[in-house]
Image (cartoon, rainbow, N blue to C red):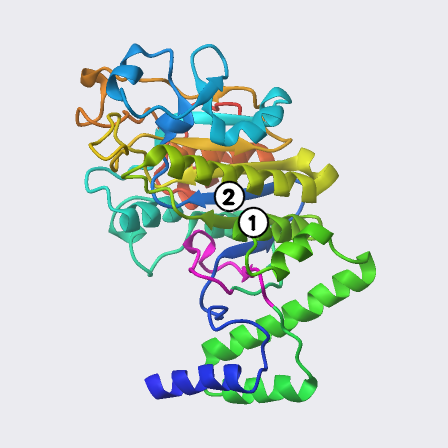
């Protein structure tokens, strides 16, 4: 089997059937799309690595914040008199002032104790608790959303990139794509590719999907003209910012039939030298959100962006100018459909007695409940369906009112 897989890779490289690197493999997913009825648009961004929400939206009004972090001081500016925003997101301040940016503090998944990135991300994307949420044998909560939304269909797209995005995996039809993809195949080349994958249904299906995607993009360009120049430049440039390319393509598809998109931004694990590392990650997140806003144009007003991470980080700084794996974290909200200009959530405080395990920010909210209320208000889904089918055994609690 290994020899057969290797020969297929050599075939693709050697005869030049697909104009993309070997990293652009059908089973490596970095962005996923699905179409749905209506005009509401949802973008879910997974921030992999455990983003330190206490440094992003700093509780400067809590006296224990400065005591917990005497030497870890990222520059920030006031938001509302109690919380201050890390300067890494300074480019998003105009969105805050327009009510198109908000945050939810002290939230988490039900994951507790072990603080494993892999398990934490599995639970975040599965949207459930217990062994059923871990590993490959389960679906993601966005896919379960599609299964209960009437009139949803799979958007023709292609998954290539660095990772398999689990949040949209499941029975509902979903398609995938990643940047720097070129698929210019003659009819003979297409036939040769299918012959190479003839005895492997999984690879054959991926090849067919890739061809359909190439045809779909060609049809879109023919009917709508050239795509956004910035998006095309980022997709062509090997040195470009990948997240911006993902966001630009996502915006383009959301302007057509796609209504749900999800992708991830890596690199939020800041055990050391956090100030510089986190600032750079936040700038990438800012660029991603602003690229979505620019690309969506008038459709930004009907868009909700939810950015979430697998867990937060410790309340206290460590000995290497960073923070370690924690529990309570932060969600980032953006889009013209949100009721922004607000930090949501019940603030638990940072006194040692108020911390989880006397070390982490205590979670007072569930990221699944925030997402569920957003989907209920965006798509009109029944609460019972969300609590039983999309997020099994979830109690959504009171509506936080994050959607206008």
Label 2 belongs to which residue? 44
Disc number placed over residue 32 in the picture, else none: none
Which of these two is toward me, 143 or 336? 336
Query: Is 204 above or below relative to 116?
Result: below
At mark 1, the secondary structure is: strand
Say if mark 1 contacts mark 2, CB within 8 Å: yes
Which residue in the structure is indicated by mark 1?
A: 261
Q: Is residue 358 above or below residue 191?
A: above
Figure check: 33 above or below 213: above
The answer to which quarter of the image holds residue 355 is top left
209 and 149: which is toward the camera = 209
Neighbour tally class for label 2: few under 14, some 14-19, many 20 plus, Cα within 10 Å:
some
Q: Is residue 404 visible?
A: no
Q: Residue at x 65, y 38 (%)?
A: 293
Residue shown at 56% from the left, 61% from the top: 238
The answer to whether residue 240 is left or right of residue 123 is: right
Magenta part, dominant SS: loop
N-terminal label among 1 and 2: 2
For residue 84, which quarter of the picture?
top left
Q: Position of residue 282 (x, y in %)?
A: 47, 36
| x and y, in percent, of residue 74 in the image | 39, 26
Dot 2: element: strand
8 displayed left or right of 18? left
Task: Report the Cα–Cα distance between label 1 and label 2.
Answer: 6 Å
The quarter of the picture where the C terminus appears is top right
Is 291 included in the stretch rendered in magenta? no
Query: What residue appears at the point 48 percent right and 23 percent down from the top-left corner?
Result: 400
Q: Would residue 330 be visible to someone looking at this image?
A: yes
The boundaries of the magenta stretch are 160-181
């Amino acid at each position: 089997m290994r020899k057969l897989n290797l020969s297929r890779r050599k075939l693709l490289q050697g005869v030049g059937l697909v104009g993309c690197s070997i990293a652009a493999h059908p089973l490596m997913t970095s962005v996923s799309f699905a179409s749905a009825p209506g005009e509401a648009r949802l973008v879910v961004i997974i921030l992999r690595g455990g983003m330190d929400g206490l440094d992003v939206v700093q509780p400067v009004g809590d006296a224990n914040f400065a005591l917990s972090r005497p030497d870890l001081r990222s520059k920030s500016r006031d938001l509302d008199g109690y919380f201050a925003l890390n300067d890494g997101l300074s480019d998003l301040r105009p969105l805050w002032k327009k009510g198109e940016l908000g945050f939810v503090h002290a939230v988490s998944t039900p994951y507790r104790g072990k603080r494993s990135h892999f398990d934490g991300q599995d639970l975040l994307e599965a949207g459930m608790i217990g062994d059923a949420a871990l590993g490959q044998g389960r679906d993601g909560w966005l896919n379960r959303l599609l299964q209960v939304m009437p009139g949803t269909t799979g958007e023709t797209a292609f998954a290539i990139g660095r990772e398999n995005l689990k949040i949209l995996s499941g029975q509902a039809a979903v398609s995938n794509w990643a940047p720097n993809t070129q698929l210019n195949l003659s009819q003979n080349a297409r036939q040769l590719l299918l012959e190479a994958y003839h005895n492997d249904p999984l690879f054959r299906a991926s090849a067919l999907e890739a061809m359909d995607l190439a045809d779909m993009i060609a049809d879109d360009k023919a009917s709508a003209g050239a795509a956004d120049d910035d998006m095309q430049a980022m997709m062509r440039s090997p040195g470009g910012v990948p997240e911006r390319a993902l966001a630009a393509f996502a915006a383009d598809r959301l302007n057509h039939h796609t209504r749900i998109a999800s992708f991830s931004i890596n690199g939020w694990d800041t055990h050391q030298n956090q100030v510089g590392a986190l600032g750079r990650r936040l700038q990438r997140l800012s660029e991603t959100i602003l690229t979505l806003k620019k690309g969506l144009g008038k459709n930004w007003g009907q868009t909700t962006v939810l950015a979430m991470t697998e867990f937060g980080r410790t309340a206290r700084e460590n000995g290497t100018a960073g923070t370690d794996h924690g529990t309570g974290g932060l969600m980032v909200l953006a889009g013209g459909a949100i009721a922004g200009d607000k930090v949501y959530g019940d603030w638990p405080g940072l006194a040692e007695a108020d911390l989880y395990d006397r070390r982490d920010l205590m979670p007072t909210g569930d990221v699944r409940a925030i997402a569920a209320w957003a989907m209920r208000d965006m798509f009109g889904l029944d609460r019972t369906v969300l609590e039983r089918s999309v997020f099994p055994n979830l109690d959504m609690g009171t509506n936080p009112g994050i959607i206008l």
